[in-house]
Image (spheres, rainbow, N blue to C red):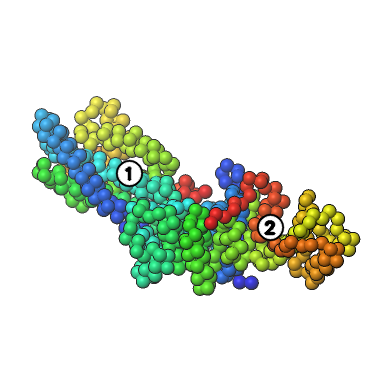
Amino acid sequence: MNFAAIRVIYRAEMQRAINTLFQTLASPVISTSLYFVVFGSAIGSRIQTIDGVSYGLFIVPGLTMLTILTQSISNASFGIYFPKFSGTIYEVLSAPLSFFEALIGYVGAAATKSFVIGVVILLTASLFVDLQIEHPIWMLTFLVLTCVSFSLFGFIIGLWADSFEKLQIVPILVITPLVFLGGSFYSINMLPPFWQTVSLFNPVVYLVSGFRWSFFEVSDVNVWTSLTMILIFLGVCLAVVSWMFKTGYKLKE
Amino acid sequence: MDNIISINDLAKVYDNGFEALKTINLDIERGEILALLGPNGAGKTTLISTIAGIVSPSSGTILVDGHDNVRDYRSARKLIGLVPQELTIGAFETVWNTVSFTRGLFGQKKDPEYITQLLKDLSLYDKKDNQLRMLSGGMKRRVLIAKALSHAPRILFLDEPTAGVDVELRKDMWRIVNKLRESGVTVILTTHYIEEAEEIADRIAVINHGEILLVEDKTELMQKLGKKQLIVEFKEPQFSLPDSLKDYSLDIDDKGLVLTYTYDATADATGITRLLQSLGEAGMSLKDVRTTQSSLEDIFVDLVHSDGIAANEQPKEKSA
């Protein structure tokens, strides 16, 4: 195992975030604060409680998921796409390290950044609402699994993309709608039965539901189902990445 | 013969059907400087990229110091340093960090003393805290060399190392290459600047259309294929030569002022003495006498021409 290589890739990726620390942290803090002002205070005060939880509090897990999903994808996809774009990927390809080791470096750093951002959002949210976490271990489990699996997903997008347009297209056209329609700001039980069934095909529903359950013991689907779904997603991403590495997909000619 | 790289039946066919390499067989000796010559698109970069592990071979094997570069890629790649043709380098990292990054990628522990010495050797030490985007093209080229040497490789690939660099850097580069050779590092240099190969290489390999046309010791190659000519200039035009010179391979220009004699420099009897004597006996007054030898460039052009290369793909003259 080439630990030195994993360490330098991880550090270089983390350094990129540290170099733009203000942008990395200010953006999620400001957007979270705006969501709380608009949904939590202005609109939320006129919305009745959902399953006994005030609306301001109810949106915290969904809001956190919304940000860490997009940040994980964006960090990981950019992390691998940029060396491909600039040509500096030759170093990684010619170094004595396995694809798996490179993956740990890149995805580990992207997931770490998302995790930190998730924690910052929760801290920001606690300034606006009286945040309670009923099951901290479950909360951390969902947070870590989401950061890792969506960083993997972002890595796949970064490998697949051969233009900046493609790099943006999946997050904008797929992830954002899935997150907004995944119960981030509402309970899917509030939807008509047909749309409830349709929502169950949205993987984000399981993430948000499980994550929300760890805070308030309120969920749209069983927490074990949520855990199973995220593990399946993680497994699928790992399988795709292994195939990409084995075949050198979009990396080696 | 102690080969550090052995390439056997290597072929590379891209997805679009283009055959970049066609059954390459090449042995590279430990500690030598091998110049890989070829026009643009000949397959030079594909060949070294395949050895370095960046491009997957379609068939064939490459052994790097006995290690298969696919099955035992870790051991093989640890021995190789690569300076790419393009200035592919980051923007916001510092010189020190980017060189240390490459060292880490190759599994080496931190060694600030080694990196310090390396940067000093490459006249980069005073720029060690500068961001890469602030450096000139020549400085970036030095950084790429520093990165390639950061893990003290035993084999160094220099892919078109002097493309667009100034005289000072070129001299520095050859000084470094000579120093590396003295320490036992094998250097493989790809270039289409013949002068470079002539100046520094031990052996020359010529590649064209994905095939190795020849691999030869540089001196032997120049002796074998190089022509030597004696050029005699007359004071007055001469349109007939003495009968005693009929057996010579002679050419005289249209004005009758310049006589060219092509001969084998390695032969025991070149015939020069008898030629000059005959000219003197015939009463021809000589203005000047000089000899020329075909350069490696001439040899190269002949080779690629015979391989069917178009004239516009010939190697460029090296700029000063």
Relative horizontal placement of residue A43, taking residue B20 as reference (left or right): left
| Residue at image point 15% right, 33% down | A38
| Residue at image point 26% right, 27% down | A193
Q: How many marks?
A: 2
- Kind of residue indicated by mark 1: Ile
Q: Nearer the viewer, residue B35 or A103?
A: B35
| Residue at image point 20% right, 33% down | A186
- Kind of residue indicated by mark 2: Ile
The mark closer to the camera, 2 or 1, is: 2
Q: How far separated are the C-alphas under marks 2 and 1?
A: 55 Å
Q: Position of residue B246 (x, y in %)?
A: 87, 60
Q: Nearer the viewer, residue A156 or A211?
A: A156
Q: Position of residue B300 (x, y in %)?
A: 66, 56
Mark 1 — residue? A73
Dot 1 lies on which element? helix
Point out which mark residue B154 bears: none
Q: Quadrant of residue B128?
A: bottom left
Q: Position of residue A81 (x, y in %)?
A: 39, 46
Mark 2 — residue? B299
Q: Which residue is the extreme one toward the bottom?
A: B183
At label 1, counting other C-alpha atoms closer than 10 Å, the crowd grade (few under 14, some 14-19, many 20 or more) is many
| Residue at image point 34% right, 33% down | A173
Q: Which residue is the extreme one toward the right?
A: B243
Relative horizontal placement of residue A57, taking residue A88 as reference (left or right): left
Q: Position of residue B190 (x, y in %)?
A: 56, 57
Give the quadrant of the N terminus of chain B: bottom right
Dot 2 lies on which element? helix
